[in-house]
Image (tube, helix red, strand yellow):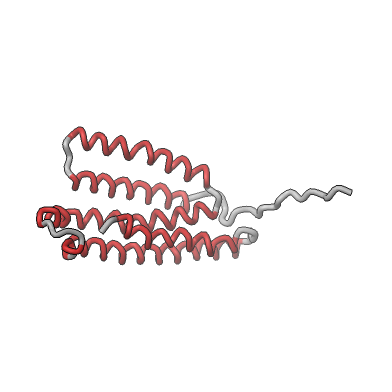
Amino acid sequence: MSLVVLATFSETSSQTFQAFLPQFENDTSSEAKNAAKQLIRKLQGFAAAVGLAVATVGGALAIYGSGLFTADLAVAAALKPLALPLFLAAALHSLICSAEGVLLVQKELGFLGKVYSCSAVFMPIVLLALKQQGAGLRAVWDAFVAFQAVRVVILNCRVHLRTRPIPMPPYEPELKEPYD
C-alpha cells in the first residue's frame, strides 16, 4: 500500500486544526490561550492515534497483504522488509500534518515556507547520495523515516516551544470610507 494512500487519512488532522483553532484568533485572554493550547494537545493526541491506526494497517498490508498488490512473489518478498519503515513514516506523517495545521492557523507561512524549501532541497540531495552509494530500497525508506522524524521535531518544536502567544492577534482590515 502506498504511503500516499495512507497519508490521506493523516492529512485530515491539518484540516481539523484549521477548522477548530480559528475560534480563538480574536480572543487574546489567558483563558482563550489555555483553551487553544488544550485543544492543540487533544487534537494532536487524536492525530497521533489516527497515525498509529493508519500505520498499523499499512505495515500489516506490507507483511500479510502483498498479494493484493502483486502476484509476483519476488515483489511480495521485497515488500515485507519495508513494513517497519512504512509503519514509521505513516505514523510520523500524522504528527507532521497536525503541527502544520496549527502553524497554518497561526499564519506561520514564512516559517513553513522555509521548512518546506529546505526539505525540497535537502531530501533530493540525500536520495542522490544514496543512489551513488548503490543503496537499496530499504535504505531509501530509512532515509525517508529520518526525514519525517526531523520534520516532526522541527514543526512540533515551533508549535509547543514558541514564545509568541497563541492565539494570533486579531486581524483588523482597513475600512475605507465611501466617496461622497
Give the quadrant of the N terminus: bottom left
**Residue 147: image location, x then y, percent:** 32, 45
Quarter of the image holding residue 105? Answer: bottom right
173 or 74: nearer the eye? 74
**Residue 39: image location, x then y, percent:** 50, 65
Is 103 displayed left or right of 32 in the figure?
left
**Residue 35: image location, x then y, percent:** 55, 65
Instruction: Identify which residue is drawn at 40% across, 47% down.
Output: 154
Instruction: Identify which residue is drawn at 14% across, 57% down.
Output: 76
Instruction: Identify which residue is drawn at 17% across, 43% down.
Output: 136
The image shows residue 137, relative to residue 95, as above or below, that is above
**Residue 55: image location, x then y, percent:** 28, 61
176 or 142: nearer the eye? 176
Is 39 displayed left or right of 73 in the figure?
right
Is 98 displayed left or right of 90 in the figure?
right
Total marks placed: 0
| Residue lying furthest right | 180
Instruction: Identify which residue is drawn at 83% across, 50% down.
Output: 178
Quarter of the image holding residue 71? Answer: bottom left
| Residue lying furthest front | 71
16 or 5: nearer the eye? 5
| Residue lying furthest left | 73
